[in-house]
Amino acid sequence: MKMRRLGWLLAGLSLSGIGVAAGQWLATPGEELSGGETTVHEVGQNAFSLPFANLRGERRTDFAVGNSFFKKNWVQAPASTTARDGLGPHFIARSCSACHALDGRGAPPVDLGEQPMALLIRLSIPGTPSKQAGVVPEPTYGDQFNNDAVDGVKPEGKVAIHYQEISGQFADGERYALRKPTYQLTELGYGSLHPDTMLSPRIAPQVIGLGLLEAIVEKDILKKADPDDRDSDGISGRPNWVWDAPSQKTVLGRFGWKANTGSVAHQTAGAFLGDIGITNKWNPQEACTAKQDDCVAAPSGGKPEISDDLLRKVVFYSQTLAPPARRDVTSPQVLRGKQLFNEMKCATCHTPSYRTGALKGLPEAAFQTIHPYTDLLLHDMGEGLADGRPDFQASGREWKTPPLWGIGLFSDVNGHTFYLHDGRARNLSEAILWHGGEAEAAKQRFVQAKKAERDALLAFLNSL
Amino acid sequence: MLLKKLSLAVATALVFASPVFAAPSAAQVSQHYANLVEANYQDVLTRVKALQTAVDTFVAAPSAEGLEQAKQAWLAAREPYGQTEAFRFYAGPIDDAKGPEGQINAWPLDESYIDYVKGNSKAGIINKPNVAITKQKLASLNEKGGEENVSTGFHAIEFLLWGQDFNKEGPGNRSYTDFVDGQAPNADRRRTYLKTVTELLVDDVQYLVEAWQPNAKNYRARFEKDPQAVRKMLVGMGVLSRAELAGERMEVALASRDQEDEHSCFSDNTHRDIVTNAEGIRNVWLGQYKRIDGTDIKGPSLQELVQASNPQAAEKLSRDLEATLAAVNAIQAPFDREIAETEGRRRVQKAVQLLRKQSDSMVEAAKAIGIQRLNVKG
């Protein structure tokens, strides 16, 4: 048995052309195919914008139509362009691509005088939420703060961001700085906020590989959950259970910074309403509250404002954006980084690989070996990152492990390197240094590591 | 001596007896391509400079005739430009990290970002007096806060010259009085805007010409030594064929029937965009380009390169390209009416099918010269 396995290993090695050095980690053949057969080989600005490589024929047309509507600017009603009116009355952006530019990662405003667009602010108050909402909305402003509005309607207010620098040093003496943001809502349009209002900043994540994440088999996610830390490894990942409007039941959460949505369809429909003000099949009512008279009175762009067919195509588009292949998988530094990623136990939460199952309506995503680097579970990440705002089962200290695929391409696609849920980390090193709570031990291993090792780990992350 | 003469005779006989041409080398093919690209961009520059002259004349003294001249100049500039789109998609000068493609040709655009629209007379940069109208400012506003927030390029100019198209039978019909002080609000800013974006367009095309000039330390110099040059040529052809032309420009319009999804929706010139795109693809394949002054560029081509390895694959692609050209030429203007009517839709759909077919043939042709994984996204 051992001999046979050794033979396979050697055959595999010779195929990949990697020499065997004692103790040296090796590239696994095919590991650069982050999305299995859906993977595209692309870098540069378009790296996140291509369809699954195995998408064919008419489905590519649906992708193209969905793409067109993903980019479309919505306009306020009434308008002569009836297919795309219905913006607002309250909104934060006029199109999906305004925040998910080139299907990539949004950034917080660089100029602090500018209003954020790709960073949204979720709102809620303490209490017992409904099964569908998962949060108790703030009574006047709802569950999301909208800093823009159509003509004749007041915006809900403005978002002010302040950063506080926190400095520290690695074990080898090299200094680093972190910036901690605080948020204030100012120039409120409809009076004061509830005194116990909780707010949570959320940056627009990259839109790649979502259909693949949807196709990960539920039990493969749940088997890694360990809420009571039975194996005493310090990690206690938990699933979030969330309402899914399309299937009309509670499902495992997979999407969003706190895994607060369970399907791409629910996520997309929610974003259409919450971010752009476009009513749709699963969100037929505008998000105006009773106290927002001007919002309630504003004209509608139709019932619903986006047709079911076009919504379906935008969902399909969002599901079928391809993960780009990794780069430099055989570089010795990247391989050393991969080894460290495992030794430092980053991989415990950033689970490297899965084999997906079947997903209704998306055969291209089925039975693929993918490498998203996430367990899709909630983890307590410590006080520094906490937003204090629960969302379905997620506590105010928990965040879902985000997928790491594509993080090495943010600068190519979006011209920046801002990471974490609010874009506070200005580079990958800062992102790691913010890890606390369950991840504190792993973070300390990074702090203690030698410079060459830290650089190798960063090289590995940049290859994703 | 006799042996030498004999072998010389034999050799000569062989040369004349054999009908096989010597295949060009990949380097010769890419060098000739660089010539072709430069000539095409030069023609675009000539035409956009003519557009600039017409715009400047119009802006100095707006009149109906002047507006018409400017429109004709715009249409004329699109003829060579459409053919250059086959040089995109491989991060060449047009679309690398600092490439000007989005600044030159982004579409569709949100009209209300630039100027007033039906139902909103105060919309757009033109109607916001606190926004400076300079090349830098307009360039910085291009695609800011959304991919449809287009402020520059061919289609911004098109919108200013034609206005919104509310007419299924014809193009937009903006009055020249929009540019006359006292006849329309912010006429002065509208004139400045038109003049400024045209100047920016000339700058951007100039940049492309310089990148492809011979005997300079530029992209062309690197391209001519690039072992991947032939692959890039094929990528440009393939992605334009399948993803961009068939997909973005035709299938989306067929699916949505939305006039907004038409490439040149204000001028109703989309049928020419489609034809010139298809011509551009064929130009790259055959290594041929007809200049605006009538002269023909000819030289070592991809077609010859592939033919030397796999004549059937080369023949197939050549036939497919001709079939596509016939089909795109059969599409009737205006495109927005074509996609709304049964017969018109059939014509557009046929062209889409042939574009897909030629993309498949390109993948085969690429394999014939050792390029295994040509991704045309189709």
Image (cartoon, coloured by chain):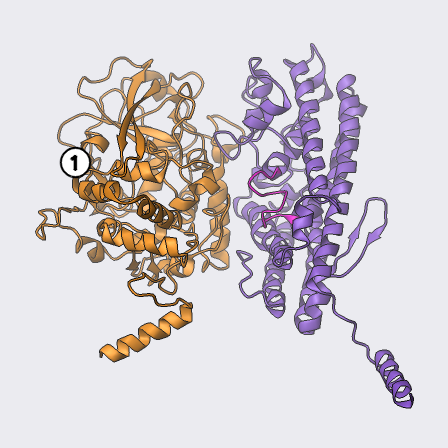
**What residue sits right under mark 1 in the picture?**
A395
Within 10 Å of the Cα at label 1, are there few (<14), some (14-19), or many (20+) other Cα atoms?
A: some
Q: Is residue A211 left or right of residue B198?
A: left
- Quarter of the figure with the C terminus of chain B: bottom right
Tell me, yes or no, if residue A329 can be seen here: yes
Residue B26 part of the magenta-drawn span: no
What quarter of the picture does the N terminus of chain B occupy?
Answer: bottom right
The image shows residue A42 at horizontal and vertical percentages of 49, 52
Chain letter of the residue carrying label 1: A
Depth order, front residue of A458/A49:
A458
Q: Is residue A458 above or below residue A367?
A: above
- Name the tint of chain B in the rendering: purple
The disc labelled 1 sits on which kind of residue? Ser
Residue that protrudes farthest toward the top in the picture:
B182
Relative to A372, A193 lies left or right: left
Q: Quadrant of residue B115?
A: top right
Residue at 33% over, 54% down = A336
x and y percentages locating residue B324 in the rendered image: 68, 58
Which shade is chain A?
Answer: orange
* Residue B289 image point, x, y percent: 78, 52
Q: Quadrant of residue B58?
A: top right
Secondary structure category for the residue under label 1: loop
Q: Residue furthest front?
A: A172
Secondary structure of the magenta portion, mostly? Answer: loop
Q: Which residues are magenta?
A: B87-100
Q: Nearer the viewer, residue A245 or A55?
A: A55
Q: Position of residue B86 (x, y in %)?
A: 66, 50
As for residue B89 lying within the magenta part, the answer is: yes
Q: Is residue B68 visible?
A: no
Of residue B38 and residue A391, the one placed in the foreground of this image is B38
Q: Residue at x 71, y 42 (%)?
A: B81
For image coordinates 40% across by 72% down, the residue present is A14
